[in-house]
Image: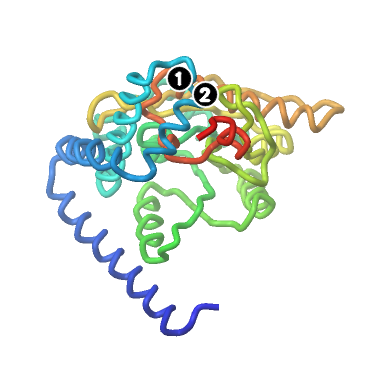
Amino acid sequence: MPSKRGARAQDLIWRLEAAAFDVATAFLRLLPVDFASDCGAMLLRRIGPLTGTQKLVDKNLRIAFPEMSPEERRRIAIAQWGNFGRYCFEMPLMDRITPASGRVEVIGAERLAEIAKGEEAAVYVSGHLANFEVMAAVLMDAGIKCQVTYRPTNNPYFDQRIIESRRKYGISMFAPKGEVAALRGLFAALKRDEAVALLTDQKFNEGITDPFFGQPARTSTGAVRLVLRTGARLQLGYIERLKSARFRAVVCEPIYLKNTDDAAADLAHGVRLINAFIEERIRAKPEDWWFWVHKRWTDEVYAALGD
């Protein structure tokens, strides 16, 4: 247990971080949206490659694209830092990056309209692509009641600011401890004819091992379990950055998974389908994926790199 003095010091640090975030937010909201986004890209393209995280980015790109030239991997590494910087500077401006603002083109809006009718349950699955916050705005613009789980930040004051910013779009969020609690809450939402949304492209130790770019990766089973248990439509979709703070949201054809007499195989099939979808999107535009900075694969995969 931390000492009272240590706890007070930590609380002070958290408060100072939150205050700095408030100052940065106030400043960014004075800027035009595209200019703010461009500034974020310029800053992180310079700073990101100098951080220790760059080593992990390099390893991840080698795992995913072993046949690619070092020069091309370097280009992607710098570009993904630019995308991350854009997101950081866009986050305080999300109320200005919506379909109504003209900054978001929606492909497949009719599928969201079907979900909004509430005639069938829907599990919306995507990945951390471009600015994934935009998808929340798209779902809310379509009139969809949606609930998502999220992983809270260590700083509770900063976390509260994130929650409040997302509630502007009508998103109801909760932070369960573990996959079982998450599934229980999301299943209840589906029973209320609400949609649920999940991002499934990060390492999930409680999940199953499934190929991702041909290498084993621990992957969440939550979305597939919800679909198989409720008969909900599996609705895949993604965000693509077009230019600066302008985006395309693509809502794909719905998928209906079938239950057979082999529950384990049904689960594995659904997980593999989602992983393949996300991998396809990353291959199409690798600089849009956030998690080149994330240890996505198993320890054995990284050990095999030999460095």
Where is 283 relative to 156, above or below? above
Who is closer to the viewer here, 20 or 299? 299
- Can residue 94 be seen from the camera position used here? no
Q: Amino acid at mark 1?
A: Arg
Crowding at mark 2 (Cα within 10 Å: few <14, some 14-19, many 20+): many
Looking at the image, which residue is at 61% across and 29% down?
234
Q: Foreground: 268 or 186?
A: 268
Q: Residue furthest right?
A: 261
Q: Is 210 or 116 nearer to us in this picture?
A: 210
What residue sits right under mark 2 in the picture? 279
Residue 100's disc is none
Q: Amino acid at mark 2?
A: Glu
- Which of the image's four quarters has the N terminus? bottom right
Q: Determine whether the residue tagged by mark 2 lies in a helix, strand or loop.
A: helix
Give me the residue at 75% from left, 25% from top.
258
Distance, label 1 to label 2, CA atoms, is 6 Å
- Left/right placement of residue 141 relative to residue 278 reads left
Image location of residue 118, percent across then percent down: 57, 36
In the rendering, at what x and y percent does residue 101 appear? 24, 34
Residue 110 % position (x, y): 46, 23
Report helix, strand or loop for mark 1: helix
Query: Does 34 appear above or below 167?
Result: above
Residue depicted at 61% across the width and 26% down the height:
215
Q: Residues within 10 Å of mark 1 (few under 14, many from 20)?
A: some
Q: Is residue 287 left or right of residue 103?
A: right
In the picture of the structure, the residue carrying the numbered disc 1 is: 283
- Residue 235: percent from the left, percent from the top? 56, 28
Q: Hey, which quadrant is residue 83 in on the image?
A: top left
State the residue at coordinates (22%, 38%). Answer: 46
Q: Are marks 1 and 2 in contact (CB under 8 Å)?
A: yes
Tell me if 22 is positioned left or right of 173 in this view.
left
Question: Is 92 on the left or on the right of 159, as rendered?
Answer: left
